Image (tube, helix red, strand yellow):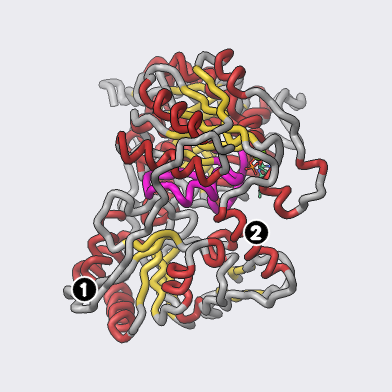
Amino acid sequence: MCGTGVPAMNLAQSLLAALRDHGAREIFGIPGDFALPLFKEIESSGVLPLYTLSHEPSVGFAADAAARLHCSLGVAAVTYGAGALNMTNAVAAAYAEKTPLVVLSGAPGQHESRTGLLLHHQAKTLDSQALIYREITCDQVRLDDARQAPALIARALASCRRESRPVYIEVPRDMVGAPCAAVVPLPPQAHDAEALAACVAEILARLAAAERPVMMVGVEVRRHGLEDKVAALARRLRLPVVTSLLGRGLLANSDAPLAGTYLGAAGTPEIAGLVEESDALLLIGVIVSDTNFGVSRERIDLRQTIMALDGRVTLGYHTYPEIPLAALIDALLARAAQSARVCAVTPPAYPHGLAADDSPVVPRDIAIAINDLMSAHGRMPIAADVGDCLFTAMEIENTDLVAPGYYATMGYGVPAGLGVQAATGRRPLILAGDGAFGMTGMELGHCARYGWDPIVVVFNNAGWEMLRTFEPAAAFCNLGEWNFAEIAQALGGAGVRVRTRRELRDALAAAHGRRGRFQLIEVMLARGAISPTLARFVAGAKRLSAGARHCFPLPRGEGLRVREVDSPRVQNHVETQ
Ligand code: S1T
Ligand code: MG
C-alpha cells in the first residue's frame, strides 16, 4: 500500500505478480479489443515474457507444453468470445491430461455490459463463455470487484496447482487499471496425517506380500514435479517401473529400473506380461483411459491395483480420500525400508543404425534415424502430434516428450514444440503428420522473431493414414500431396524433401548442424506405410472391437462405479456419483 492507503498496484499487476509467484514463467497469447488493456499491462510490466502466435488453439497448446516442462503453471491469454472460444479444444486437452493451465480472458467492461446491446464476440449471453469454460476447467473467477480480486486469484491459482487442471480467469477490460492489493497465496492443502500413515502402511504391506509388484508412472508424477522422488522410491522398493503411454518420457533422466512404456497389445510382449501378470500393480498418477489401457491383451483387474490419482488412493474396494500425491510419495519414502527383492529389469532396446541406402523411408526408419542423431549429439526434447508420428515416437529413445497421448487432438505438435523452446531454451524435435501440420504448422512463421529453431519432421503420406488403417477404402482420408518443404522457405525456415533412408540421415545431420532458423524435413511416405506400433495398436483395437468383452472393473467404493462395456468402443466409463 502506498501512503494514502490506496494499493500501489493495479489489478493486472497484482494478477501477473501472483502468476509469477505461483510458478508461471511466460504467457502465450493473442489479444483482442476486450483484452488490449490487459496485454498492454503484460507488455509494460515485463513481469512475464509474452509470446504471441497466430491461432488460439496454438496458444493453448504452447502454454500446455510449457507447463508440462516447467512442472508448473502455463498461461494462455486471449480475448473474449472469438479468442477464448476458439481455444476450448486446447483447454479441454489440458483438462483431460491434467495440465495446470491458466486461461486469462479479456471481457467486456461493466458499463458496456449494462447497455442492453448485444456486444460483438457475444454468443448467447455474456455469461455463456464462463459457463462453457466450467466444463473444461476446475475453477472459474471473474475479477469484477478489485476488493475481491486478490482472494479470487489466490483461490483459482491454488485450485490450478492442487488439481493440476486448467482454471479460467475473466478480466473485464475496465478492471485492469483498478487499484488492487497484492495476492496472498493460500497455504498448501492440508491432509489427515493418520489417514496418510494408514494408507502408506497398507500400500507397503501389499507390495511386500506380492511376488510380482510393478510400478506404473503417469502424468501426475511430472505435473507435481515428483520424478526424482518416484525414481528413488522405485529403487528403494526394487520395483520394475513402466510408464503409461501418456507418461512416456517420464524418468528419462533418472536411474530408476525403467523397463519401458506399457502399450498393451501394441507394445512388447515382455512389458505387457510384466504389467498384466503383476499381483500388485502400483499406478502412480496414471489416467485410467483407453489409450493407456485400451489395448491390453489381458483384462487388468483394477480392483487388484493400488491407484494414486486425483488426490486419492484406491486399493481394492476402498479409497483414502484427500491424499495429495506429493504427501503420499514423501510418506512412502520416509517409511519404506530398502527392499532385498531382486529387481531384474531389462532396459528397453531402441533401434539404432539406420541403413543409409536408397530404400524408401518407412516410419520406423525415422525413429532409427533420430536415435542415431541423439546418440551422436545428445537427447533432444520431442513434441509429437497425433497420428503415426506419435506411435513412431514409441521407438525413439526415452527423452522429454510432450504429446496429447490421451486426449489425442491434432494440431498440438508445432505449437507445443515452440512452447518447449520458449519455456526451456532447448531446441526441440517436432514430429507431425501432413494432416496435423496443416492445422497449426504455419505457427513456424513466428520462429524468426523469437529466435526459435526447432527441427521439424513432417510425415507426409498425403492423407489421414491413421484413419485409413481403420478404413482402407475411405477416399475421404486422402489429402493430396502438399509441398511442405517449399512452405518452410516462405515461413523463414529451411526445408528439404526426402524419400530415401540416405536422404533422411543426411537431412537430419545437416539440420542439426544449422542453428538460428527452423529446419523442416518433409519425409515422403508411401500410402499404407505405418509404424509397427501403430499396426499392433490397430490390430489390438480391431480384435477388441470384434465384440471382445473388455472391461476394467474399477473399485465400487467411494463413489466410483463402472459401467461394463462390451461394445466396440473400448472405453471405460468411470462415473462418480
Ligand atoms: N481433428 C482433430 C483436431 N484431432 C483429431 N485427433 C482428429 C480430428 C481425428 C484424427 C485422429 S488421427 C487423424 C485424424 C483426422 C489423422 C491424422 O493425420 P496425419 O496428421 O496426417 O497423421 P497420419 O497420416 O500419420 O495419421 C485421431 C485418431 O482421432
Ligand atoms: Mg498423414
Is residue 561 found left or right of 226 in the rendered image?
A: right
Q: Secondary structure at mark 1?
A: loop
Determine the image quadrant of residue 443: top right
The quarter of the picture where the C terminus appears is bottom right
The reply, left or right, for residue 375 in relation to residue 419 is: left
Which is more foreground, mark 2 or mark 1?
2
Q: Is residue 391 magenta?
A: yes
How far from the left and from the top, in percent, is residue 473? 81, 49
- Residue 148 seen in the current view: no
- Residue 189 sits above or below residue 577 on the image: above
Image quadrant in which the N terminus is located = top left
Q: Would residue 577 be counted in the magenta stretch?
A: no
Q: Which residue is mark 2?
A: 538
Earlier-in-chain disc, 2 versus 1: 1
Residue displayed at 63% across by 28% down: 83
Which residue is disc 1 drawn over?
336
Circles 2 and 1: CB distance less than 8 Å?
A: no
Q: Is residue 439 visible?
A: yes
Tell me where residue 291 sits by quadrant.
Answer: bottom right
Total numbered circles: 2
Give the image location of residue 44, x and y in percent.
Answer: 40, 15
Query: Which of the pair 42/142 is nearer the observer?
Result: 42
Dot 2 falls on a residue whose secondary structure is helix
Horizontal side of residue 414 vs 47, given as left or right:
right
- In the figure, is residue 397 to the left or right of 77? left
The span picked out in magenta is 385-412
Q: Amino acid at mark 1?
A: Ala
- Relative to 227, say whether 166 is above or below: above
